[in-house]
Image (cartoon, rainbow, N blue to C red):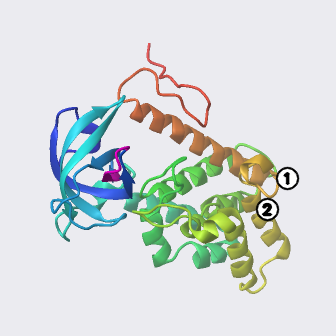
Amino acid sequence: MKFIEDFRDGDSILGHFLCKRKQMAKTKAGKSYLSLTLADKTGQIEAKAWELGIQIQPFEQGDFVKMDADVQTYGSDLQLRVIRARKSLPGEYEPRDYMPCSDKDPGELWDGVRAMAESVSDPFLAALLGRVLLTPENEAAFKAHSAGKQMHHAYMGGLAEHTLSVAETCDFLCGRYAYVNRDLCVTGALLHDIGKLREISPFPENDYTDDGQLIGHIVMTAIMIDREASAIEGFPPRLKSLLIHIILSHHGEYAFGSPELPKTIEAMILHVADNADAKLKMFETAYADARGSQWTAYHKTFARALTKSEW
């Protein structure tokens, strides 16, 4: 199949897409048409169905749709003019072709997460990881879930990739400084974003849930740890408080959604590791989106265009 990133003006396209947005609109003359946003794993493209006859069969937002369309330039962007469309049938498409995916093997990522969890020797923290993280349901979820809607690691497997990267960075940093409880820091790293399983819906939607908008993953994770740690006989109250503090402060600043600021060295290490992995992934993604150009487009998060260090 031909992916969206390879479309060129004048191409004729016959293929399947994920319909991310479907809206009925009207021209200035009052004629109805369909305005669509279509996606595959390489990106999104706007589409218009100007003629709403029998060639445009029923489908809904969130459906996979088979379309016959022409690629046209509209302003500075490419757009599809839809000629025929219908809902795709099961077996006609591979779902992973229509959702962004990590370029790393999901099984290997989860093996890395499990190995980091099994390296925690503190019996209470190890027991907590067994209850909260190391379950068959979480293994499947981490392999398929994103770590964000669009900011960073916003693709299938992104949660496992981000979690492992942050945990490995924390593990490295813990060995560089005194007064660090390595097991506490690594446990915080492994659990810091587990609330995103409830904050963000699974693909293909990958959007904030009601609880995600009302509560957020930081508080969700803190509540989960409090509940599960309290169910472990003899779990030290001070240890539970220190771990919850790591979770509550990992965004580092009130302006970035942290209910608390880092007040322990473990909390600061996790914040630094989490922030570094998120920001560096944004650079990596911006470079990839630039498609070989030396400069990226203007990046909203960094408020500047970025460039590669090639010389």
Q: Is residue 42 visible?
A: no
Could you tell me how many numbered marks the image carries?
Answer: 2
Residue at the spot x=51%, y=58% of the render?
A: 159
Q: Nearer the viewer, residue 172 or 22?
A: 22
Q: Amino acid at mark 2?
A: His
Q: CA distance from mark 2 to mark 1?
A: 8 Å
Crowding at dot 2, Cα within 10 Å, few <14 / some 14-19 / many 20+, comes out as many
Percent of width and height locating residue 227: 72, 80
Percent of width and height locating residue 286: 47, 34
Percent of width and height locating residue 111: 44, 63
- Helix, strand or loop at label 2? It is helix
Left/right placement of residue 153 relative to residue 272 reads: left
Task: Tell me, yes or no, whether the highlighted magenta stretch contains residue 229.
Answer: no
Percent of width and height locating residue 254: 79, 50
| Residue that mark 2 sits on | 245
Start-end of magenta stretch? 28-37
Task: Tell me, yes or no, whether the highlighted magenta stretch contains residue 33.
Answer: yes
Q: Nearer the viewer, residue 213 or 23?
A: 23
Of labels 2 and 1, earlier in sequence is 2
**Picture quarter with the C terminus:** top left
Q: Amino acid at mark 1?
A: Lys
Q: Nearer the viewer, residue 6 or 73?
A: 73
Left/right placement of residue 13 relative to residue 61 reads: left
| Residue that mark 1 sits on | 263
Residue at the spot x=59%, y=66% of the render?
A: 199
- Helix, strand or loop at label 1? It is loop
**Residues at discs 2 and 1 in contact (Cβ within 8 Å):** yes
Q: Is residue 99 visible?
A: yes
Q: Quadrant of residue 73?
A: top left
